[in-house]
Image (cartoon, rainbow, N blue to C red):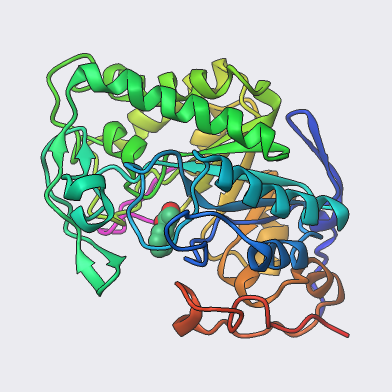
């Protein structure tokens, strides 16, 4: 029996951008930027170009500042050299007929002193060390003890997001995704396992969402809301995260982002560590823009989610690592290449640009 997956291949207007299909390339950290300058290069342009038939490409997480870096060889979008590197990428994707958003990232406490200027401590809402690891020069290591940000430092970080967003425009992107998921800085402010602040950025849900709203408004200084999305992971425990009431927190968050008229809410639907249910349908209903679902979807389950109205678009991560022509393969119901885990994070062309397309 063959499943009808035609829902994946209908066009969709997302914010102010027309997408030719519902298949999104999820943001994927691949650690292949240049050392020292942390700029993308021709190799990265080739990788993204190979994947340009996606309805939308979302780049790997990209640090907005030196302080925002937490892993080796991830790209930035704060220097002119980085902007020039990203121009190679956007030009390649556009020449191949694609659309590409950049994911803006500050890792917060998920960093290591060896990656910070002058060996400084990473910054976080509160001085709580995450039980998680990162890749540094010497291998896989525990993240460092962070220091709590002073309230007076927060506007500077918001300005770093504003500058990164303006740089993204210069680099030729079609839009911007704000990374508020997976236990990085914005998520650290959102969830109360990592935010113990007693000032206007901590305590109540309204206060914990404040930093995300300030960042979003800073991005909206240079981008129309129809070209801005935001990604969350309401119950994912990754990077040692938890919250006492994720339903109330993320429904309020979705309402606030809806009020700012963002193009989409991108949701990592990874379940809670204890398997407690979370109602992603209500979350979707609290947001008026498009809903991008992500977390282990297949060709068939993605089509079913769109058909049932549970998602407008579906993002694929692992499958996009090993299948540059995923759209064509889904269309033909062709076999998929297996992804090689050993080459996910760092390395050269192997496991990056050498996965074959269908002939
Ligand atoms: C895997 C390895 C390093 C970073 C995320 C940016 O989880 C990441 C990431 C994933 O959002």
Picture quarter with the C terminus: bottom right
Residue under the image location 13 percent in, 49 percent down:
129
237 lies above or below 176: below
Q: Is residue 115 visible?
A: yes
Q: Quadrant of residue 334?
A: bottom right
Q: Is residue 276 magenta?
A: yes
- Report x, y in % for residue 165: 56, 30
- Report x, y in % for residue 185: 32, 39
Horizontal arrangement in the rendering, residue 80 relative to residue 16 (left or right): left
Q: Can residue 270 be seen in this view?
A: no
Picture quarter with the N terminus: bottom right
Residue under the image location 51 percent in, 60 percent down:
295
Residue under the image location 46 percent in, 73 percent down:
346
Q: Which of 304 and 52 is in front in this view?
A: 52
Q: In which quarter of the image is residue 80?
A: top right
Q: Nearer the viewer, residue 202 or 12?
A: 202
Q: Which of 16 and 215 is in front in this view?
A: 215
Horizontal arrangement in the rendering, residue 58 relative to residue 330 (left or right): left
The region drawn magenta spans: 271-279
45 lies above or below 130: below
């Amino acid at each position: 029996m063959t499943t009808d997956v035609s829902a994946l291949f209908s066009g969709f207007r997302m914010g102010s951008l027309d997408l030719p299909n519902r298949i999104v390339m999820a943001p994927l950290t691949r650690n292949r930027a240049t050392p020292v300058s942390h700029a993308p290069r021709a190799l990265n342009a080739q990788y993204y170009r190979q994947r340009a038939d996606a309805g939308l490409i979302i780049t790997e997480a990209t640090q907005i500042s030196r302080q925002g870096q937490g892993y080796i060889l991830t790209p930035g979008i704060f220097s002119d050299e980085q902007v020039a590197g990203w121009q190679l990428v956007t030009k390649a994707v556009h020449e191949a007929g694609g659309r590409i958003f950049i994911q803006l990232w500050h890792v917060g406490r998920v960093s290591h002193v060896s990656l910070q200027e002058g060996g400084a401590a990473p910054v976080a809402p509160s001085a709580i060390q995450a039980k998680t690891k990162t890749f540094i020069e010497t291998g896989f290591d525990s993240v460092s003890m962070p220091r709590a940000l002073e309230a007076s430092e927060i506007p500077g970080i918001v300005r770093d997001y504003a500058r990164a967003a303006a740089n993204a425009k210069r680099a030729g992107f079609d839009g911007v995704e704000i990374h508020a998921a997976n236990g990085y800085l914005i998520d650290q402010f959102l969830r109360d396992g990592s935010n113990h602040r007693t000032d206007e950025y901590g305590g109540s849900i309204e206060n914990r969402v404040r930093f995300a709203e300030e960042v979003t408004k800073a991005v909206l200084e240079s981008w129309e809301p129809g070209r801005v999305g935001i990604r969350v992971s309401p119950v994912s425990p990754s990077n040692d995260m938890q919250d006492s009431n994720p339903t109330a927190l993320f429904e309020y968050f979705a309402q606030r982002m809806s009020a700012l008229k963002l193009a989409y809410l991108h949701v990592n639907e990874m379940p809670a560590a204890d398997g407690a249910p979370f109602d992603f349908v209500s979350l979707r209903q609290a947001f008026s823009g498009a809903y991008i679902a992500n977390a282990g979807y297949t060709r068939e389950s993605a089509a079913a989610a769109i058909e049932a109205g549970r998602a407008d678009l579906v993002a694929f991560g692992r499958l996009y690592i090993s299948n540059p022509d995923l759209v064509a393969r889904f269309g033909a119901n062709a076999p998929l290449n297996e992804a090689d885990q050993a080459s996910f994070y760092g390395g050269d062309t192997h496991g990056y640009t050498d996965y074959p397309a269908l002939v």
